[in-house]
Image: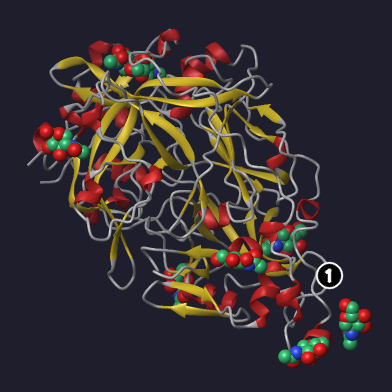
Amino acid sequence: MFTSNSFAIHFLLLPLIAFSVLSAGKSLPPQVLSWSSKTYGPNGPWNAITISIGSSPSSPPQAVDLLPGGQWMTNVISPSVCAANTDACGIPKSAGFYDQNSSDSVTSISNTGQIYPNTQMASVTGALPSLTGEAFWMFDTIAFSARPGTGGEPGAVVIANFDLLVLAEALEELPDGTKYPVQVGKLALGAPHFNQTWSHIPDPVPWNGTLLTSALFGSGRTSSNSYGMHLGSAALGIPGSLNLGGYDQNRVLGPVSSQPYTLDHFPIDLLDIGIGVAEGESPYSFTKQSGLLAAGNSSIGVAMTVFVEATVPYIYLPQSACDAITKNLPVIFKPNLGLYLWDTTSPRYQSIVSSPAFLSFTFRLSNSVSQNLTINVPFALLNLTLTAPILSQPAPYFPLRPDQGPSSSFTLGRAFMQAAFVGVNWQDDVEGNGLWFLAQAPGPNTPSNPTPVAISPTDNTITASTVDWKDTWKGTWKLVESPSNTTTSGNSTSGSSSESPSSTPSAPKSPRLSKGAIAGIAIAVVLGLAGAVGVAFFIWRRQRKNSKPKPQLSTNGPDPLGEAPPRFPTSREEYRSSGYGPRELDAGNESFHKPYKPEPSSESDLGNGAHQQSLRATTPGSFPIEMAG
Ligand SMILES: *[C@@H]1O[C@H](CO)[C@@H](O)[C@H](O)[C@H]1NC(C)=O
Ligand SMILES: *[C@@H]1O[C@H](CO)[C@@H](O)[C@H](O)[C@H]1NC(C)=O
Ligand SMILES: *[C@@H]1O[C@H](CO)[C@@H](O)[C@H](O)[C@H]1NC(C)=O
Ligand SMILES: *[C@@H]1O[C@H](CO)[C@@H](O)[C@H](O)[C@H]1NC(C)=O
Ligand SMILES: *[C@@H]1O[C@H](CO)[C@@H](O)[C@H](O)[C@H]1NC(C)=O
Ligand SMILES: *[C@@H]1O[C@H](CO)[C@@H](O)[C@H](O)[C@H]1NC(C)=O
Ligand SMILES: *[C@@H]1O[C@H](CO)[C@@H](O)[C@H](O)[C@H]1NC(C)=O
Ligand SMILES: *[C@@H]1O[C@H](CO)[C@@H](O)[C@H](O)[C@H]1NC(C)=O
């Protein structure tokens, strides 16, 4: 089909040029993004960010709300997603569609290929992993509102040739086979590479799809190719926080864990899961429990590698761990949904979701053998709501799914990230490697005025605030009465007297995009990313059918401590039919990218197959795309 002509090249590079140019340069404040006033389901509510895409003389830029997170291509929904499902579309119109036919600034190139109808997107790096459908790569100008962390008015940021995956048909599937169209796209937050670069036959100049964090860094607006994010809680009114080139220190509490990322994921070793109570009495018959991760499952050893992923909604854990966690919870498992509904008739439901009780996740701290980091997720954050099209009558649910996530790994999704700070410094060394950061995020009692801190190109950790996590929840949760009181009274006083966290004082929402800043932005503004000077070095490789066998790779990625093999997909064959070529597979199977050492080279090396082959061995990032026929 598409095989022989379809390939992409990948650029490795500029990190180092930019790195060396800018690491000596001045520190710029982070750029703080504004959040939409609207929130989205159907398994949230989730906070979103508004961007506008494209423009033409006849139609205004198209405003779309997107959930921030994930790498590589930003995923936007085409109106055709609804056309194909007119009966049950139910996409909130407010989330917005992107129609490339209404934009004059869009480019598509033949070499990107497409995701074919009915393809599982999980194996396509940068696509929303839970979807099946059809999609196209396109490049268009985007604009959004950001303000410098040092204060001042929000301004419009414009990025040309932004890397988009336009979802023409995109379905989520419930465990019972029911399908529904995706409700909202994702705003990708950079990638291990500066641009996503494609060959552009017959044009000898490769084509670059630009990415959010690197575009701001490359244009000299931020100190580094990095970001810091706390999704917040739409239900409890904790506004989201997204800083490019830095982070809001108010959103980072306690120890910070730094570890390598992979091509498309943020893996970390999960050591344990527990239940605890921050203060007062316990709503349980116990005050503390641990050992829930490995309970009743001898195959889970000291640790289990999980992904932390903002592109999926739930907390995906083994059945055994879910059983241990839910054993003492008033929840009812719904096999058709693969989720647990809260038993709202139980008096313990109100008591637990309004109490200072939390689910705790203990991780290996910065790849240490002996130190750990615990992130507490109060049950108040785990009282989310299922709405249409998943359930016609909204119902509170506990966002735990006893299964692997769509990326075939156990995954902590957005539900977890309501309580976690996640950041990345995409390149913190001259070789272009970087680290991602995980820390406890605060509760509703957080200053609405941020404390922005820049991430410098060489930073391999970030500095937390000294605030005590408990204090950020004070006044929001309701202390539990002593158990004898609740058991003897026989009726639930806690239900009626409990304060709803959503009605308690909380930080106000961030200001919306203001002053029409993003409207009417000129079409052809092109970012001057050309500031980076120096030797560009890239790899170009024509993908052939039946390409050479790849170097042997173990089915599991290397684990630095040899304790818990990451659960990467083991079958490369399964990928062959799903759109990605061997180089991509190999990259995906490398759990931690290795430094690449570009040899002195010049463009005359292009097309020199032998040379490329030898480079490929040390350049996991190059991923020509093979559309399997
Ligand atoms: C990224 O792509 C932009 C737009 O094509 C280009 O100006 C810039 O030089 C590229 N940067 C790198 C590091 O490849
Ligand atoms: C855009 O136009 C093309 C060609 O007319 C058409 O096939 C496609 O369906 C249109 N896309 C949308 C989203 O309307
Ligand atoms: C893409 O980036 C590379 C590396 O910076 C550059 O050589 C090339 O000219 C860029 N392509 C376009 C179309 O700007
Ligand atoms: C036990 O844990 C493994 C992961 O180590 C998981 O694949 C398996 O499904 C778990 N078994 C049960 C019964 O949950
Ligand atoms: C985490 O570290 C503390 C202090 O060293 C230790 O007591 C605890 O057992 C560790 N927890 C896990 C799950 O390893
Ligand atoms: C739990 O969530 C529901 C919405 O599904 C909300 O109405 C209710 O007030 C929440 N309960 C508590 C205690 O926050
Ligand atoms: C029940 O709670 C009230 C106040 O919350 C307290 O005064 C009383 O002593 C408690 N009774 C028991 C039996 O614990
Ligand atoms: C609930 O408890 C209160 C005080 O303990 C009591 O006055 C009331 O009658 C009880 N209601 C029911 C329905 O048992």
| Left or right placement of residue 576 versus residue 179 in this view | left
Q: Position of residue 233 (x, y in %)?
A: 60, 52
Q: Compared to 98, does 398 lie above or below?
A: below
| Left or right placement of residue 415 versus residue 281 in this view | left
Q: Secondary structure at mark 1?
A: loop
Q: Position of residue 158 (x, y in %)?
A: 43, 20
Q: Going 34% across and 57% down the picture, which residue do you hit?
A: 569
Q: Going 41% across and 72% down the picture, which residue do you hit?
A: 338
Q: From the viewer's side, name the closer residue of 514 and 530.
A: 514
Which residue type carries mark 1?
A: Gly
* Residue under pointer 1: 280
Q: Compared to 69, does 616 lie above or below?
A: above
The answer to whether one can see residue 157 in this image is: yes
Q: Compared to 54, does 588 lie above or below?
A: below
| Left or right placement of residue 209 versus residue 373 in this view | left
| Left or right placement of residue 64 versus residue 543 in this view | right
Q: Going 42% across and 68% down the picture, which residue do you hit?
A: 403
